[in-house]
Amino acid sequence: MCVFCEIINGNIPSTKVYEDDMMVAFKDLNPQAPVHVLAVPKEHICCANAITAENSKYVAHIFEKLPEIAKSQGIDSYRIINNCGDDAGQTVKHLHFHLLGGIKMEEGLLK
Ligand code: 5GP
Ligand code: ZN
C-alpha cells in the first residue's frame, strides 16, 4: 500500500488539517514554504495521467475545498502544484496537490 493510502487509513501518522469522505489534507513532512499542505484523494489514483471521467470528481472536490483549506491556514494567496511522473519530480505515486503559501513567491514557475 502506498504511503498516502497508509496516511489515509491512519497507519502512518500525519498532521491533518482537513478531512472528509473524499479527501484528506495534511502538512507536508518536508515543508517548502510556511504553509505546505498536501491535498490527496481518498481513492488511490497514481497521478494526473490516471484521471478519468469516473474519478475526476475527486479532483473537482479537492479544488472546491482548497480555498477554505488555504483560509484555515491563514492565507488567501497560494500556489497549487501537481507533479506528474518522474521527470516532474513525483516521488509519491498517489495523486496529490501541493498547496504552498505564506511567503512571497517569484513569478517564474521553475527554479
Ligand atoms: P511529490 O514529490 O511526489 O510531488 O511530493 C511528495 C511529497 O510528499 C513531498 O513533498 C514529501 O515531503 C511528502 N511526503 C513524503 N512522505 C510523507 C509522509 O510520510 N508524510 C508527510 N506528511 N509527507 C510526506
Ligand atoms: Zn495510495
Image (cartoon, helix red, strand yellow):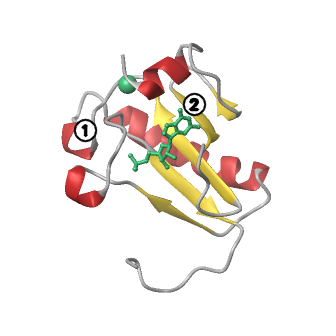
- Disc 1 residue type? Ile
Q: Is residue 62 left or right of residue 48?
A: right
Percent from the top left, x then y, of residue 105? Answer: 58, 79
The residue lying at 21 percent from left, 35 percent from top is 52
The residue lying at 61 percent from left, 24 percent from top is 20
Q: Is residue 110 above or below residue 43?
A: below
Q: Nearer the viewer, residue 71 or 100?
A: 100
User: What is the C-alpha distance between the residues marked 1 and 2?
Assistant: 18 Å
Q: Residue furthest bottom?
A: 107
Percent from the top left, x then y, of residue 37? Answer: 61, 48
How many residues crowd around disc 1 within 10 Å: few (fewer than 14), some, or many (20 or more)?
Answer: some
How many residues crowd around disc 2 within 10 Å: few (fewer than 14), some, or many (20 or more)?
Answer: many
Quadrant location of the C terminus in the rendered image: bottom left
Q: Which residue is mark 2?
A: 24
Q: Is residue 43 left or right of residue 75?
A: left
The residue lying at 57 percent from left, 20 percent from top is 12
Q: Nearer the viewer, residue 67 or 33?
A: 33
Q: Secondary structure at mark 2?
A: strand
Q: Which mark is residue 3?
A: none
Q: Which residue is mark 1?
A: 51
Residue 26's image quarter? Answer: top right
Percent from the top left, x then y, of residue 18? Answer: 68, 34
Instruction: Mark 1 vs mark 2: give the one in front.
Output: 2
Quadrant location of the N terminus in the rendered image: top left
Q: Is residue 74 left or right of residue 65?
A: right
- Disc 2 residue type? Val
Looking at mark 2, is its residue's CB closer than 8 Å to ligand 1? no
Q: Is residue 106 above or below residue 73?
A: below
Q: Secondary structure at mark 1?
A: loop
The number of numbered discs placed on residues in the rendered structure image is: 2
